[in-house]
Image (spheres, coloured by chain):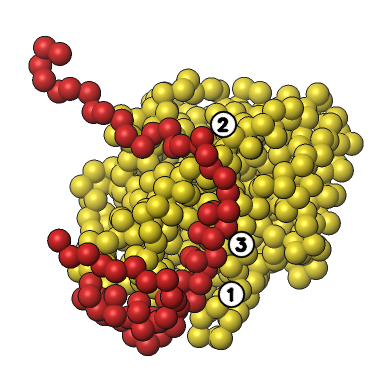
Chain colours: A yellow, B red
Amino acid sequence: MAGQESDLIYKSIAELAPLVARGELSPRDLVQASLNRISQLDSSLNAFLDVWEEDSLSSASIAEKDIADGRYLGPLHGIPIGLKDLIDVEGTPTTGGSKVLRENLAISDATVTKNLKAAGAILIGKLNLVEFAFGTTGLNPTTGDVKNPWDKTRITAGSSSGSGAAVASGMITAALGTDTGGSVRMPASLCGIAGLKPTYGRVSRAGVLDLSWSMDHVGPMARTTEDCALMMSVLAGHDPRDAASSSNAVPDFTAEIARGLDGLKIGIPNHYFFDEFVDSEVLAAVRSAINLLEANGAEMVELSMPWVEKGRPINFGIILPEAVSIHEKMISEHSDLYTSEVRSRIQSGFKVAAVDYVRAQRARQWFNYQMAESMSDVDVLITPTVPIQAPKIADCTPSSGNPGAGSELAMFTGVFDVTGQPSHSVPCGFTSDGTPIGMMITGHPFDEPMVLRVGYAFEQLTNWHQKPPTDIPTPN
Amino acid sequence: MKVLKMKQSDDPQYFSNRAQEHEFVISEEDAGEIDRVGMDVARTYSIIRQIDTTGYESVAIFVPIPSKRKGY
């Protein structure tokens, strides 16, 4: 079993599913391997807030029997998956990583939870995050900081910090995160995994704690792009419980994933994303990835986007008042239970004038129009996911006297929460310190298949996504 | 209804007082942090105010709820 476990830990859903389907791999063994890895690593990484050992083994036994009896439900059947602790699972607490909600028992499943259960996925537990997802570094004084498996002195980024660390370290095969300013893609980038923020409205947010209702997205975080596509096939679809849920037809996310790069036009912005403030090693890795895509059939098109730097301010300018509106009652009743950082952010938002929020919403429309015009001749954009290398945790902790470290993290990702476009991060190299670098692929609204196609093609040409993290022990 | 005066400064004391009005627990550390975040907030909206958004009204400010009266 020990030898088998070490083989399983870093396998993708696409690799595990056929073994499970054919009865060659027991879901119970797979879940036990996941639990063993959690037991081996989580005391040092702090990715999980809750692990459901008994329930997950019991669900795995049921899955095993169902599959043996000919009731195979598809690629997620028997696969260990974790959920960011903003997502409701009936009968368990949804804390949002905060003392405020420590006794908040979910009375029903979120729609995404229901979908995963219906697909036979085994829910392993709840994952750590920034308090109420309101921050980008991934640090949380209440639940403890999540450590980056590539260098435990560094942040994972957030807010889906536990999701990033747990998938990267092989504790689970895949996870759900949420993304309001980049919280799926930033930890995916810094932890060396794939993370997709789908189009706004594509995946239901019913039963998921809000940070900013007009910017929040739920998305998959996994070892590969193909795994993100497999998860999207289960997660996507209209949900009357979510007012923003789209009725657009749901495509087959895997059907065209292997079509390659021939004939594709890739936009490369010549403003902002490749400017001098971006870390030189990040720039070099992304430029090298672009060259590789070009050498393999894609046509590169330089795009002028002088307005694009306004994206992150618009993103934050909408998030803040919406977050204040969501938290106003809770903070007035339980302000002492909030962490100082989040309490301060919310209190700062009380001064925002109503007209500034309306201006920000109008600016969002203006921004979306510019983006649609600029991208009218290309299939996707390629940019770095984040402009910096993973900062040290000590530099991001306010008490260190350096509250600014990490503040640049969401400069690029937040742009595409404003536009609601599908946006995907894949590993594209390493810094000289050995931490992962991510490349962001962003497509037209509701064209996740194109984004996934480019990500998949890149992964077939490289092996960045196959390297295991270096600052954690190998599996037992 | 109580009308709260808006003030243009980023004075931590202002936010501290404001928080007290809301009966929040606030420490000196909070006040400093609020001041720092407040400057980010001011910068954010200053950038947004520079954008000419004429004609770019948000498309879904209000959507009427369909009638729930039977027979409609």
**How many angstroms separate mark 2 from mark 3 (CA)?**
23 Å
Q: Check disc 2 and report its element: helix, strand or loop.
A: loop
Q: Check disc 3 and report its element: helix, strand or loop.
A: helix
Q: Quadrant of residue A474?
A: bottom right
Residue at 58%, 81% in the rendered image: A402
Q: Chain of mark 2?
A: A
Say whether marks 1 and 2 touch (CB < 8 Å).
Answer: no
Q: Quadrant of residue A293?
A: top right
Q: Residue A65: percent from the left, percent from the top? A: 37, 34
Rendered image: mark on residue A445:
2
Q: Is residue B18 above or below residue A79?
A: below
Residue at 64%, 60% in the rendered image: A190
User: In this orientation, which residue lies closer to the viewer: A214 or A158?
Assistant: A214
Q: Amino acid at mark 3?
A: Leu
Q: Is residue A185 above or below residue A262?
A: below
Rendered image: mark on residue A409:
3
Report whether mark 1 lies on the same chain as mark 2: yes
Q: Amino acid at mark 1?
A: Gly
Residue at 30%, 48% in the rendered image: A89
Residue at 50%, 66% in the rendered image: B42
Q: Residue A141: percent from the left, percent from the top? A: 42, 76
Q: Which residue is mark 1?
A: A404
